[in-house]
Amino acid sequence: MNNEFSMTKETQLFSEIKNIIDSAKKDLAVQVNSTMSALYWEIGNRINQDLLKEKRAEYGKQIVSQLAKQLQTEYGSNSFSEKNLRRMMQFASVFPDRKIVVSLIRQFSWTHIIAFIPIQDELKRSFYMEMCRLENWSVRTLREKIDGMLYERTAISKKSEETIKNELASLKDSDKLTPDLVFKDPYFLDFLGLHDSYSEKDLENAILSEMEKFICEMGTDFGFMARQKRITIDNEDYYIDLLFSHRRLHCLVVVELKLGEFKAAYKGQMELYLRWLEKNDHVEGENPPIGLILCAGKNSEHVELMHLEESNIRVAEYLTKLPDQKLLEQKLNQAIEFARNRLEQKNK
């Protein structure tokens, strides 16, 4: 009995000391990363100052190449290769304010920063930085989000510059998410493995079997609640395809799956579901439910005329097969331009 008690105490002691060591190692790794990132900014900033004085492109190429060789000889590290020195120079150019850099290096690793640097659009870069911070993305996830054009697919990208700045500032200051930062168009559902011919039931079943990937595409704050949730209105049964909750938006999210193009009748159906939930399934402190209609296609002007956002309804396309990257980029940029032009016309 005493031996068992002694072993239990020893196991507990080992576990506690292990936690202390692991925590210290983690803190040390963060400190080392911050110190190295700060060093890289200082190096990049110093080189930029020297090259700015000279104002000669040829001199710049020669000095960076020669400096890299000297530093590698002195310190024997690939960290000071010519490629990395140029990254440091870009780092200092993209983030010229030392105060901002101090905050940046506390939140992100150097490899995260390397992923942010090539993003030329400042608002787009800020979006990825704030979402990465909020959802604690790994470097791999961050790169996947950038490659998957998350910003261009998010509703916020189609808003005015002032609106984007205000919502990102609110996100930065108080971690406040808005639907425009959450909902996308289109959604990539290529992981479902659906072929050319499938039914709405097939689509729903595929989503349920790949729920983890589906939620990853939707957003990490989504929580699955029900499939084919039955609601009864005037003794008639209706069934909600998929019901989710969203942790940061503090609301229920109804997802309706449609095979073809968006139709005007879908608005009435979704409004019925949302008003029923608001009346019968509302929790104190919760925001009104949001509806998301996922269609195989939609006409932007047709959707615009429906004034869906006034009813807390979003419409988005889903893609079961990804198109060529250049075609996708062209399509998304056209959608952004179309939306912003419409916005400017309204404000005139």
Image: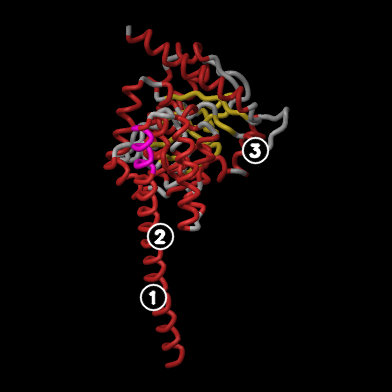
The amino acid marked with disc number 3 is Leu
Q: How many marks?
A: 3
Tags 2 and 1 touching, CB below 8 Å: no
Q: Is residue 74 above or below residue 310?
A: below
Q: Secondary structure at mark 1?
A: helix
Nearer the observer, 77 or 56: 56
**Which of label 1 and label 3 is nearer to you?**
1
Q: Which label was assigned to residue 29?
A: 2
Kindly report the distance in space between the C-alpha atoms of the residues bearing marks 1 and 3: 45 Å
Q: Quadrant of residue 162?
A: top left
Can residue 161 be found in the magenta stretch? no
Front position in the image: 230 or 196: 196
Q: 229 above or below 103?
A: above
**Element under disc 3:** helix
Type of amino acid at the residue the image marks with label 1? Ile
Instruction: Please report whichever mark, 1 or 3, sits nearer to the chain's N-terminal start.
Output: 1
Mark 1 nearby-residue class (10 Å; few <14, some 14–19, many ≥20): few
Q: Return the x and y of residue 46 as percentages of the image width and height.
A: 34, 42
Give the labeled residue for mark 1: 17
| Residue sitting at x 42%, y 47% | 136
Q: Which mark is residue 167?
A: none
Quadrant location, the C terminus? top left
Return the residue at label 3. 192
The stretch of residues the image draws in magenta is 44-53
Left or right: 316 as drawn, with respect to 167: right
Instruction: Residue at 29%, 38% (x, y): give it.
Output: 97
- Which-is-in-front pick, marks 2 and 1? 2
- Above or below — where is 34 with respect to 284? below
Q: Main secondary structure of the magenta part?
A: helix
